[in-house]
Image: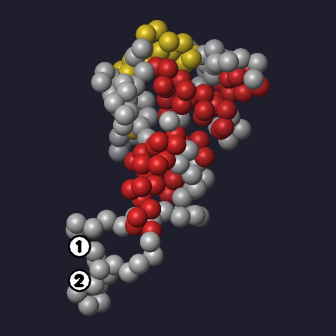
């Protein structure tokens, strides 16, 4: 899955990294490419990884926002708005977050997004980023999954292909902003 995505991304990005000068059809003193050309080059230390859990530089967040979607995001005023989740609810004790995914969200290969796909991505985040983002350890069963004592995170509960809950062991009112 990752190899396919990475191959497509590299096929789009790397042709712009050939080191050649832009076509000489701009006015003297200006280095502007014609609108039909697009050259993009991302190289270290300006971009660290295509893995969302590998965030190292501020530039990474911009690239990730182009490549990946989140369940919810914020608008320019900081209010939570829908992205992949059609709706969500939070329990009174801020320990259960129930999401319903939008219908007909598809991957590049046409496969529909499901709760299982979200769980896979979140499990990768839990395993690779639990030390950086302490809030991940609040998810029920995260520690057992990280240690290898469980084959899934117990706090990820599927109610249907588009409906799931994330349960926390500890209340964290800013979980949705994470």
> Is 19 in front, or is 97?
19
Q: Does 93 appear above or below 27?
A: above
Query: Residue at label 2?
Result: 25
In the image, is 103 to the left or to the right of 138?
left
The number of numbered badges drawn on the structure is 2
* Horizontal and vertical percent position of residue 156: 56, 17
* Horizontal and vertical percent position of residue 102: 33, 23
In the image, is 139 to the left or to the right of 16?
right
In the image, is 161 to the left or to the right of 53?
left
- Do residues under tags 2 and 1 come within 8 Å of each other at their CB atoms? yes
* Quadrant of the image occupied by residue 148: top right
- Going 48% across and 25% down the picture, which residue do you hit? 117
Query: Could one spot residue 51 in this view of the protein?
Result: yes
* Quadrant of the image occupied by residue 166: top right
* Horizontal and vertical percent position of residue 84: 37, 29
Query: Residue at label 1?
Result: 34
Determine whether the residue tagged by mark 1 lies in a helix, strand or loop.
loop
- Dot 2 or dot 1: first in sequence order is 2
- Going 29% across and 80% down the picture, which residue do you hit? 23
- Going 60% across and 28% down the picture, which residue do you hit? 123
């Amino acid at each position: 899955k990752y190899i396919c995505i990475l191959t497509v991304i590299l096929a789009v990005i790397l042709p712009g990294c050939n080191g050649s000068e832009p076509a000489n059809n701009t006015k003297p003193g200006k280095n502007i490419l014609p609108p039909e050309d697009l050259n993009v080059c991302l190289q270290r230390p300006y971009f660290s990884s295509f893995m969302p859990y590998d965030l190292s530089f501020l530039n990474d967040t911009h690239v990730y926002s182009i490549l990946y979607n989140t369940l919810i995001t914020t608008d320019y005023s900081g209010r939570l708005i829908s992205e992949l989740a059609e709706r969500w609810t939070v329990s009174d004790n801020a320990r259960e977050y129930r999401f319903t995914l939008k219908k007909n969200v598809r991957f590049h290969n046409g496969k529909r997004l499901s709760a299982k796909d979200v769980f896979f991505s979140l499990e990768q985040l839990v395993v690779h980023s639990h030390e950086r983002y302490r809030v991940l350890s609040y998810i029920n069963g995260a520690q057992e999954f990280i240690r290898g004592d469980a084959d899934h995170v117990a706090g990820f509960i599927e109610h249907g292909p588009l409906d799931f809950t994330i349960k926390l062991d500890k209340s964290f009112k800013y979980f949705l902003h994470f």
